[in-house]
Amino acid sequence: MDILLTILGLFFILLGIIGAILPVLPGPPISWIGLLCLYATNAVPNDPKFLWITLGIALLVTLLDYIIPIIGTKKFGGTKKGIWGSILGLMVGLFFGPIGIIIGPFIGALIGELIENPRNTKKALKAATGSFICFIFSTGLKLVVGGFFFYYFIKTFWIYKSSLFSF
């Protein structure tokens, strides 16, 4: 059973890292499930404090992932239409691979701002740039958390590997 939990844990860690880039998957909580799987094995000593702290970090980063782009777009002068445009641009961008995921929010925010005020392209570009910067920052934050969870998973696995594979 330990081997199955370890393999599932690694699967969830890697899926969470993918989810840090793909906005349809909540990356940090999925990666945390990977840590939980590893700690559910008989070989790894249970550490509730560590699990609660990492769960809190995963949930906080997931919440910030929704808040940061909104705050950033507003700070750069964006309107509600720009925010919604950014969200829709991201969803449409999913169909165009990594490039679409990166430029989708920018184009969406730009279109949303131009719908709000078609004559002020400078303001629309500024708001779209803010949306883009915050999207990149938010994605980076999720990748850092996913990378930490992956590192800790591998480190813990390495320490207890002989116990995990004993029959």
Image (spheres, rainbow, N blue to C red):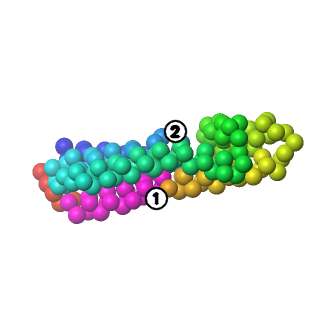
**Secondary structure predominantly adopted by residues drawn in magenta:** helix
How packed mark 2 is, by other alpha carbons closer than 10 Å (few <14, some 14-19, many 20 or more), is few
The answer to whether the residue labelled 2 contacts the one labelled 1, judged by CB atoms less than 8 Å apart, is no
Q: Which residue occupies the foreground of this view, 32 or 71? A: 71
Q: Residue furthest right?
A: 119
Is residue 86 among the parts visible in the rendering? yes
How packed mark 1 is, by other alpha carbons closer than 10 Å (few <14, some 14-19, many 20 or more), is some
Query: The disc labelled 1 sits on which kind of residue?
Result: Val
What secondary structure is marked by label 2? loop
Quadrant in which residue 29 is drawn = top left
Between the residue at mark 2 and the residue at mark 1, the CA separation in whole angstroms equals 18 Å
Residue 96 vertical position relative to residue 140 in the rendered view, above or below: above
Quadrant (top left/top right/bottom left/bottom right) for the N terminus:
top left
Q: Which residue occupies the foreground of this view, 69 or 33? A: 69
The residue under the point 26% across, 60% down is 156
Q: Which residue occupies the foreground of this view, 33 or 96? A: 33
Query: The disc labelled 2 sits on which kind of residue?
Result: Val
Residue 158 vertical position relative to residue 67 in the rendered view, above or below: below
What secondary structure is marked by label 1? helix
Q: Is residue 144 magenta?
A: yes
Residue that label 2 marks: 24
The residue under the point 72% across, 48% down is 77
Q: Does 135 sit left or right of 107 as displayed?
A: left
- The percent coordinates of residue 103 (x first, y second) are 68, 48
Number of marks in the rendered image: 2
Residue that label 1 marks: 144
Residue 136 vertical position relative to residue 108 in the rendered view, above or below: below
Per the rendered image, the range of residues in magenta is 142-160
User: Which mark is drawn over residue 32?
Assistant: none
The residue under the point 12% across, 51% down is 167
